[in-house]
């Protein structure tokens, strides 16, 4: 169990829940960061008394510095601020709850300082998974997944094999990962019925309370595609070793099939606080403040194959996973921009896939050997989307 945490993205859904879990566990909060929400960040700073806070937007950071002038909290900004929060000597664990590829550099910096990474930023592994996992192994840093599905897989495999935990290595007892998926708010609909979907409809997830971007990704099934790639990197498996199952009740968070045919599942209420807490307390378990699963009220638990025809983002991600190189990075960047445009009502729901697929086709490449290549691909994809849409 860690003693202190830095929360990158503390004003988002995962960040707020992490702060609550840290308070429940009595952990010291060493640093907090946000993109632009200075009012909430100020409240968090006054509540948790971190030594450092950072705001990505420079003008917002200046406003926060004035607001916190009566405290001894240092205030930083931009990527420099994120990097400082990720590498503070006083923190044991860095919770990467920022959204998007911006989490890549801070995660790598924290790895090099041998911090525990409580990974909630799946884009880091989608964009540069091979580099990140290689760096973690070389530095001896722990990467503990926070996504409910990857936490479930991690828990199912915990303690199995001669080497029960080694970052980025395949467990010798693992045969297949069964990655579950709620199906999103539009499960069962035809693609032709989704043209007029609004942002308000897309962010209304039937099971989980999440931020806007990840909620839209869940509605298109892109979130499951990103998680597919993340699972490949975290658990060192091939694409054919992962099967996606739609499980609308969101009670089984994922399963593993072992080499002897045994299937082990992790079950729990759909509350992100549970995997957050486990990432902070592992290898221990501590009493939590969350609801318990009531089996008598569950009713049926059902499973079905994902609909790749009407929700093609998942198939696109699986194809990118098989191609490797910069394909995952380009797909992620294009999808981020497309979702952002959709949320601003400048792009239709179905166009999220169309624009992302076109960008992948135009810019995906086999080579992703260095961080510079990946960052260039990310930038090119974002530019391509905006040129395409004229936004």
Image (cartoon, rainbow, N blue to C red):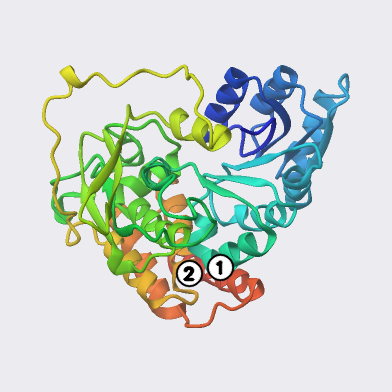
- Residue 212 point in image, percent of width and height: 43, 39
Image coordinates for residue 59, horizontal then vertical, percent: 76, 41
Element assignment for label 1: helix
Q: Which mark is residue 330?
A: 2
Residue 321 sits in which quadrant?
bottom left
Label 2: how many Cα within 10 Å (few below 14, some 14–19, many 20+): many
Q: Residue at x 42, y 72 (%)?
A: 359
Q: Is residue 361 visible?
A: yes
Dot 2 falls on a residue whose secondary structure is: helix
Residue 12, visible in the rendered structure: no
**Nearer the observer, 81 or 19:** 19
Q: Position of residue 69 (x, y in %)?
A: 88, 24
Residues at marks 2 and 1 touching, judged by CB atoms closer than 8 Å? yes
Residue at image coords 48%, 19%:
287
Q: Residue at x 59, y 68 (%)?
A: 131
What residue is shown with label 1? 378
Mark 2 and mark 1: span between their CA atoms? 6 Å
Q: Is residue 124 left or right of residue 51?
A: left
Q: Is residue 382 left or right of residue 156?
A: right
| Residue 26 versus residue 201 in the image, above or below | above
Which quarter of the rendering shows the N terminus? Answer: top right
């Amino acid at each position: 169990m860690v003693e202190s945490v830095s929360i990158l993205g503390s004003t988002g859904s995962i960040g707020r829940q992490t702060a609550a879990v840290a308070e429940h566990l009595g952990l010291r909060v060493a640093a907090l960061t946000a993109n632009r929400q200075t009012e909430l960040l100020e409240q968090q700073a006054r509540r948790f008394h971190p030594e450092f806070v950072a705001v990505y937007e420079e003008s917002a950071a200046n406003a926060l510095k004035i607001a916190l002038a009566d405290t001894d909290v240092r205030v930083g900004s931009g990527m420099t601020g994120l990097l400082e929060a990720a590498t503070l000597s006083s923190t044991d664990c860095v919770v990467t709850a920022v959204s998007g590829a911006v989490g890549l550099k801070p995660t790598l910096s924290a790895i090099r300082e041998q911090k525990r990474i409580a990974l909630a930023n799946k884009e880091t592994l989608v964009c540069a998974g091979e580099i990140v996992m290689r760096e973690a192994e070389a530095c001896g840093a722990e990467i503990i997944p926070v996504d409910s599905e990857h936490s479930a897989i991690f828990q199912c495999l915990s303690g199995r094999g001669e080497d029960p935990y080694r970052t980025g290595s395949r467990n010798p007892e693992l045969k297949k990962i069964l990655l579950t998926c709620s199906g999103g708010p539009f499960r069962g609909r035809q693609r032709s019925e989704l043209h007029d979907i609004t942002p308000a409809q897309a962010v209304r997830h039937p099971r989980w309370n999440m931020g806007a971007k990840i909620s839209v990704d869940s509605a298109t099934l892109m979130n499951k595609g990103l998680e597919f790639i993340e699972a490949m990197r975290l658990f060192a498996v091939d694409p054919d070793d992962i099967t996606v199952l739609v499980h609308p009740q969101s009670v089984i968070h994922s399963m593993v099939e072992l080499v002897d045919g045994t299937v082990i599942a992790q079950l729990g209420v759909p509350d992100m606080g549970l995997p957050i807490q486990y990432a902070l307390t592992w290898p221990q378990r501590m009493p939590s403040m969350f609801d318990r699963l009531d089996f008598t009220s569950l009713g049926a638990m059902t499973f079905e194959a994902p609909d790749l025809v009407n929700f093609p983002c998942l198939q696109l991600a699986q194809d990118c996973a098989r191609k490797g190189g910069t394909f995952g990075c380009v797909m992620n960047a294009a999808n981020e921009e497309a979702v952002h445009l959709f949320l601003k009502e400048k792009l239709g729901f179905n166009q999220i896939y169309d624009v992302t697929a076109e960008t992948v086709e135009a810019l995906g490449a086999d080579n992703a050997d260095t961080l510079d290549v990946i960052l260039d691909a990310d930038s090119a994809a974002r530019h391509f989307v905006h040129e395409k849409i004229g936004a």
